[in-house]
Amino acid sequence: MDRLNDKPELYHPDILAAARNPARWRMEHDAQYIIKAYNPVCGDKFEIRLDVDGVITDTSFFGYGCVVSKASTALLTEMLLSMHLEEAREMLVQYVTMMTDEKYELQSDSSFLPFMNARTYPGRIQCALLGWESLLKNEPFNSFKSTSHG
């Protein structure tokens, strides 16, 4: 906890580690899908790249952003590998729901857990959501309806 205002620490050790050495960080990936993620409020900007052949066969991202957006996008690109598109879309929806619904309770073993503290910092929620929401708004994820979240 932050003793000054009794809020949990924003920078969980896993977030700091992922931002320092992000998984899937590369710019040379000539991908099937290139999704641009941009937050005009703070200037964070990433390109998320995906190859899909029944499942997501390759992912990468590159750009610039704060610790939270970089770590969150690194987690995203790492988790997407080998997922079917519908399964990946469900994961995207689950993460966005977790970040935007204060009543959402997360299991203690979830990879999303380090990002839960961003919910107590309203200005930082968009950082944690940047890559995730960008994928949901673009191909190949916006081309079909989710079965459980409509």
Image (cartoon, rainbow, N blue to C red):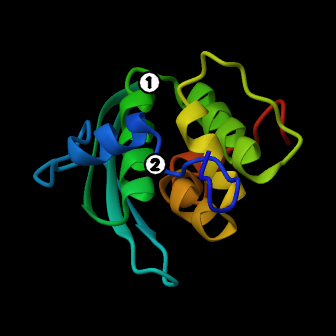
* Residue 38 showing in the rendered view: yes
Residue at 46% from the left image edge and 80% from the top image edge? 42
User: For mark 2, what is the residue?
Assistant: 11
Comparing 57 with 90, the one in front is: 90
Which kind of residue does numbered mark 1 sit on?
A: Gly
Query: Split into 4 quadrants, where in the image is the C terminus?
Result: top right
Which kind of residue does numbered mark 2 sit on?
A: Tyr
Q: Secondary structure at mark 2?
A: loop
* Residue found at the very far bottom of the displayed protein: 41
Task: Estimate the x, y position of residue 26 in percent, counting from the top left.
Answer: 16, 48
Front: mark 2 or 1: 2
Task: Estimate the x, y position of residue 90 in percent, counting from the top left.
Answer: 67, 32
Task: Estimate the x, y position of residue 33 in percent, counting from the top left.
Answer: 35, 51
Q: Secondary structure at mark 1?
A: loop
Circles 2 and 1 in contact, beta carbons < 8 Å: no
How packed is label 1: few (under 14 Cα within 10 Å), some, or many (20 or more)? Answer: few
How packed is label 2: few (under 14 Cα within 10 Å), some, or many (20 or more)? Answer: some
* Residue found at the very far top of the displayed protein: 109
User: For mark 1, what is the residue?
Assistant: 54
